Amino acid sequence: MAENTITTEQSNQLELLQTLNYDTAAAKVAVAFIQNDAFKHRLFINQFNRTFSETDYVARAAKAVQESVEAITVLSEITTQATK
């Protein structure tokens, strides 16, 4: 008998779809950024939930990606400076 378990990746995908109100166009934007990376997934969700300047889900997803990329850049710079 097959086991009916859900993987972490599937759980993350469901959380993403739910966050994006099942807007598949917005999900496409998010998935292109996240690429099954758990840190990027969590960062995107957090940024999306902070994005209120856009009302359309695709626009909010794009803004969340932009904010996430900027955060990753800043965190990378801080990490690089700390290791010098």
Image: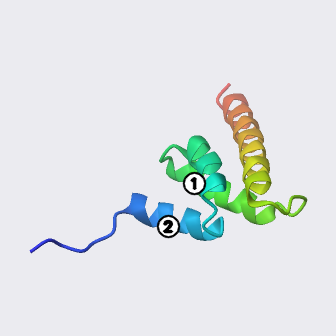
Q: Amino acid at mark 2?
A: Leu
Left or right of 1 on screen, residue 8: right
Rendering coords of residue 8 (x, y %): 39, 62
Q: The N terminus lies in which quarter of the figure?
A: bottom left
Which of 42 and 64 lies nearest the eye of the viewer?
64
Q: The C terminus lies in which quarter of the figure?
A: top right
Rendering coords of residue 43 (x, y %): 65, 54
* Res 3 → quadrant: bottom left
Left or right of 46 on screen, residue 14: left
Residue 3: assigned label: none
Q: Secondary structure at mark 1?
A: helix
* Distance of label 2 from label 1 (alpha carbons): 12 Å
Question: Going 49% across and 61% down the picture, which residue do you hit?
Answer: 13
Question: Going 59% across and 48% down the picture, which residue do you hit?
Answer: 28
Farthest residue, direction left: 1
Residue tagged 1: 41
Q: Secondary structure at mark 2?
A: helix
Sort mark 1 into few (<14), some (14-19) or many (20+) by Cα contacts within 10 Å: many
Question: Going 74% across and 57% down the picture, which residue do you hit?
Answer: 47
Rendering coords of residue 71 (x, y %): 75, 44
16 shown above or below 37: below
Q: Earlier in the sequence, mark 2 or mark 1?
A: 2
Q: Amino acid at mark 1?
A: His
Which of 82 and 63 lies nearest the eye of the viewer?
63
Rendering coords of residue 27 (x, y %): 60, 55
Residue tagged 2: 14
Which of 7 and 80 lies nearest the eye of the viewer?
7
Sort mark 2 into few (<14), some (14-19) or many (20+) by Cα contacts within 10 Å: few
Which of 20 and 66 lies nearest the eye of the viewer?
20
* Res 54 → quadrant: bottom right
Question: Going 51% across and 52% down the picture, which residue do you hit?
Answer: 38
